[in-house]
Every structure is written in structure tokens, then in C-alpha cells.
Amino acid sequence: MSLPNISRVSASGLLRSSCDLRWLLRSVAPLAAPRRALTHMGYRRPGQPREDRPPWWRVKFDLAKGLKGMKRHFKLLKEEFFAPFVGPMGKPIIEHMLEQNQVLWEFRGPHSLQEWTISCDREIGGKSEIYLKVGRNNESCLLYGTLCSDPPKDGETRYSGYCTMRSKQPLASFDRKKYHDWSSFNTLHLRVRGDGRPWMINIVPETYYTHQKDDMYSYFLYTRGGPYWQDVKIPFSKFFLAHRGRIQDDQHPVWLDKINSIGFTLGDKADGPFQLEIDFIGVCKDYAHTEDFAYEKYKRNPEV
């Protein structure tokens, strides 16, 4: 069996053919590549208009703002450097050892609301609304709005109807992550006034693996309703582990030495207006509470 003869093309012929192909490609319109592959944009829900702006259009270059930010960061760096010489967390050692109560967030004026962020299902096409403002006489925080459990008509979302308020991640100098250290306390203390709806309190600790970034510890907050304030004390041992809203089998206590944020979520499927007023959020040391963890710890290999 003989192989067919393959004709060889000279170098001048190849150069001539490449030039012809170049002129041919100039006359053809370029192919449109998907924008998601080029700019790595986030997921766009069905029916949402496409954003044709480049990803760097939000960046505003301002020299005066940059110098102001550098001054603020170096000031924070100076405070962080000299704080350990005073004591733990910048407090004297005696005060740190004898401290039994600590107020973390006290809502006294509009500046106290800058540490919080709100969101609802309107971001995914829902109809709920949520607002945050300062209460009467600038002595509280008022969270109000309207809850609607109708899912968006996009063909994908099946459930809807949630409103949430969450504290921002504390940052150190040069936007480094900073954590809340509650290891000296065992109880969460709140002073709230609600309308009788049940809320969910979420505590988000620092995780070490990427698949744990959606882990949070949750517990229920039952408001009485009416004009009177209520002091709520919830031990940290009552908080259970959940991942994306699903309670996990492998339960373990929350690590209180590195807490990123705390939040409040409403999703009781009762459509209508809601209201929650918060005076302060703090932690305390309850010596009468000796429970380590309120739930059974899951063991993959039980001891015989």
C-alpha cells in the first residue's frame, strides 16, 4: 500500500497565502466574545439589563481623597501600635479582667448607623422593603419596612420574602480585617422593642476554609410587641451552626475570639409591615450560666 504524494508549498507561496488570508479577515466582522468571560462579572438574573460599562468605571481617582485616606490609616496604625502597651484591647489590665459587661453597639445619632448595612429580597427581584433610621430623640435604631413573600417571576426563584440587617466587617489600618473578641463573655445582651414578630439573630465567625464562608450561628429572638422595652439575654451556647440556612449535623460551639459580624433576619412568611427598635447590643458574663453547649455534638466514630 503506497502513501499518496503530498505536494510541498514553497516559503514564498505560504507568505502570499497568509497575506491573502489577512485581507480576507479584515473584510469579515469580528466575532463578539461573551462579556462574562472577558470581565468576570457576577451572575446576572433573568430579565436584568446587561451592564455594558467596564469594571473600572466605578473607580474615582482623587488625589486629595487619597492623601486624606493615608492620613487616617497612619493614625489608626499609630493607635494599634501603642494600644498593647496600655493593656489588652487598649484597656488597663485590671479593667479587662474585672469587666463583666461590654456595650458593642449603642445607637445614639446618625453616625451610629454607618456601621450597619441592610438588604432584602428586592435585590433578587422580590417586593419586600426595608429601611433604617434613627429613633425618637436619637436614642435608638429603628428598623422598619414591609415583608412580601411573593417570589420574582423569573422562572428560577421559588422562595422569597426576607429582610436583614447586618453589621459591617470591622477594619484596622490599611483595610485589614479586624475581629470582635468575646471570649471573656458567655451571653449576648440586647434591649429591643418589636411588634411581636420572631427574628433570627446571626453571628458570623471567622472561618479558615473557603467552603465555610457561609457558615453562621443562629438563634431566635421573640419580641413581645407593645410600647415596652424588653431586655433579652441569650447565652452563646444556645446558638446552632447553619450553612446557607440549613442546620448542620456536625454541631460545635461558636468560637468567640474572632467574630466578624452580627445580624438580624426576618423571614416568617407573614406579609405586611414590620418594625424593630434597638437600643443597644452588648455582651455580658453570667456566672450562673455554666453550660458549654446546648446541643448534642455529632461524632463520626462514637466511642465504645
Image: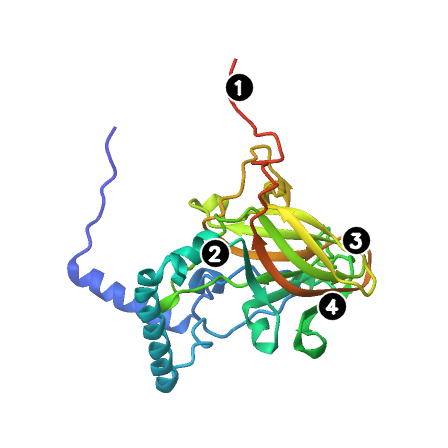
Residue at the spot of label 1: 302
CA distance separating discs 2 and 4: 27 Å
Residue 114's place in the image compared with 302, above or below, is below
Residue 208 is left or right of residue 115, and the answer is: left
In terms of sequence position, does the residue under pointer 4 or pointer 1 come before the other? 4
Marks 1 and 3 sit apart, C-alpha to C-alpha, by 39 Å
Name which residue type carries label 1. Answer: Pro
**Residue 244 shows up from this direction:** no
Question: Could you give the CA–CA distance between mark 1 and mark 2, rounded to whole angstroms?
Answer: 34 Å
Write down the residue under mark 3: 269
| Amino acid at dot 2 | His
Residue type indicated by callout 3 = Lys
Specify whether 75 is left or right of 277: left
Instruction: Identify residue for label 4.
Output: 144
**Which of the marked residues, 3 or 4, is nearer the chain's N terminus?**
4
Label 1: which secondary element: loop
Q: Badges 3 and 4: C-beta atoms under 8 Å apart?
A: no
Cα gap from disc 2 to disc 3, whole angstroms:
32 Å
Report x, y in % for residue 145.
Answer: 75, 68
